[in-house]
Image (tube, grey):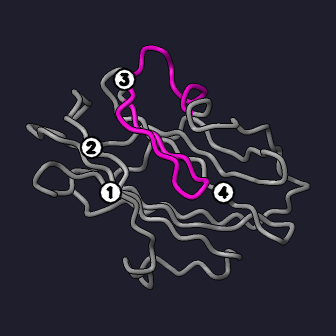
Amino acid sequence: MTKNILMYFMLPVLMSNVACVLASSSLDDWVENKTDKDENLLCKLEHNDNYFLASESDGRLKVAYRIDVTSSTNKPKSFILRWEFQNENNEYIGLNVSPEVIDNGYVTQGDKIFAEEVSYRNVFLNDSKRLKINIGLKKYISSDDVPSSRDLNDNDLEKISFCDTPSPILVK
């Protein structure tokens, strides 16, 4: 088990080279767009214009985010996003395995740009009675500003308490 899974996004591309689609206008619209009707929605959250969701789909944990990467330059902001998966005893249950990415890219809404990703995550629930998901987030003006993983300090990330729900039956 790992304490956390870090996801680094360094997005130093010119927006003229990025294919963007229109973003959903509300959290509920976005969640509806990112989930199937047969999925069990566990949690959803809007935090500072960023969206997050967790659902159970065919026995698997599906998570998604929409991060506002709008900047005053012609490049989107870079960011670090960390998902932490814990049980009711605050034991880390995220497996040190790369997520299975279903979809990712950029979307626009008015003059805002968002980075989005939907993925399946590997967690070991075993006999866990609860699933807790916390998020760490930090945005950077440039990819040059993003620290290496060994230089990253937990205190640098904004802590977002995202989800605390009865444990669904998930792939172990």
Mark 2 vs 4, N-terminal side: 4
Does the magenta run of residues contain 62?
A: no
* Circle 4 residues within 10 Å: few <14, some 14–19, many ≥20: many
Mark 1 vs 2, N-terminal side: 1
Residue located beneath label 4 in the image = 68
Tag 2: residue type?
Val
Residue 165 position by quadrant? top left
Q: Residue drawn 69% across and 60% down?
A: 69
Q: Residue drawn 39% across and 56% down?
A: 83
Q: Residue drawn 83% across and 47% down?
A: 110
Element class at badge 4 = strand
Q: Is residue 3 above or below residue 119?
A: below
* Circle 1 residues within 10 Å: few <14, some 14–19, many ≥20: many
The image shows residue 66 at horizontal and vertical percentages of: 60, 48
Residue located beneath label 1 in the image = 84
State the CA–CA distance, disc 4 to disc 3: 26 Å
The image shows residue 11 at horizontal and vertical percentages of: 70, 63
Residue 44 position by quadrant? top left
Residue located beneath label 2 in the image = 123
Does the magenta run of residues contain 43?
A: yes
Which of the two marks, 2 or 4, is nearer to us in this view?
A: 4
Q: Which mark is residue 74?
A: none
Element class at badge 2 = loop
